[in-house]
Amino acid sequence: MKLRCLSLGVFSIISCTLLATGIMAAEDCGQVQSIARMVRAQSSAELINEKGRAGDTDRAKIAFAARYFELNSKDKVAADRLLRRARRACGSQLR
């Protein structure tokens, strides 16, 4: 049950970010594929390896922070990073 709530929360943050940054923003297909690979990563090492290829967009940062938190849910630094990225990307929508 906790995992379901956590996944729903992460999905909500990513959805908010996508809407806030514009879903149809022009991006390199390679970056989009790297973001997709980050979201599917099975380990932190695999995730970090893809991070460099995904670019420096808000979408890539949120995807990294969300997946890193899912893989390391007891890591308070990961939780803080995810919340800061979400607040920055969504602005006043989270206040």
Image: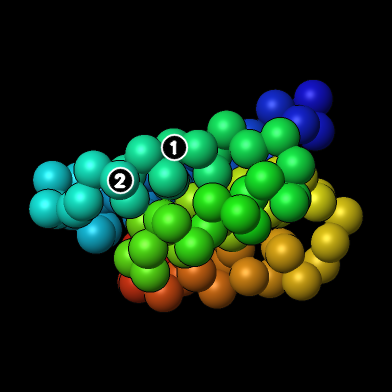
Quadrant into which the N terminus falls: top right
Mark 1 to mark 2: distance in Å? 10 Å
Disc with the residue nearer the chain's start (1 vs 2): 2
User: x%, y% of residue 15?
Assistant: 38, 43
Q: Amino acid at mark 1?
A: Ala
- 30 or 85: which is nearer to us? 30
User: x%, y% of residue 33?
Assistant: 36, 39
Q: Residues within 10 Å of mark 1 (few under 14, many from 20)?
A: some
Q: Residues within 10 Å of mark 2 (few under 14, many from 20)?
A: few
Quadrant into which the C terminus falls: bottom left
Q: Which residue is mark 2?
A: 30
Q: Amino acid at mark 2?
A: Gly
67 on left or right of 71: left
Q: Is residue 45 among what the camera can see?
A: yes
Residue 85 - label: none
Q: Which residue is mark 1?
A: 36
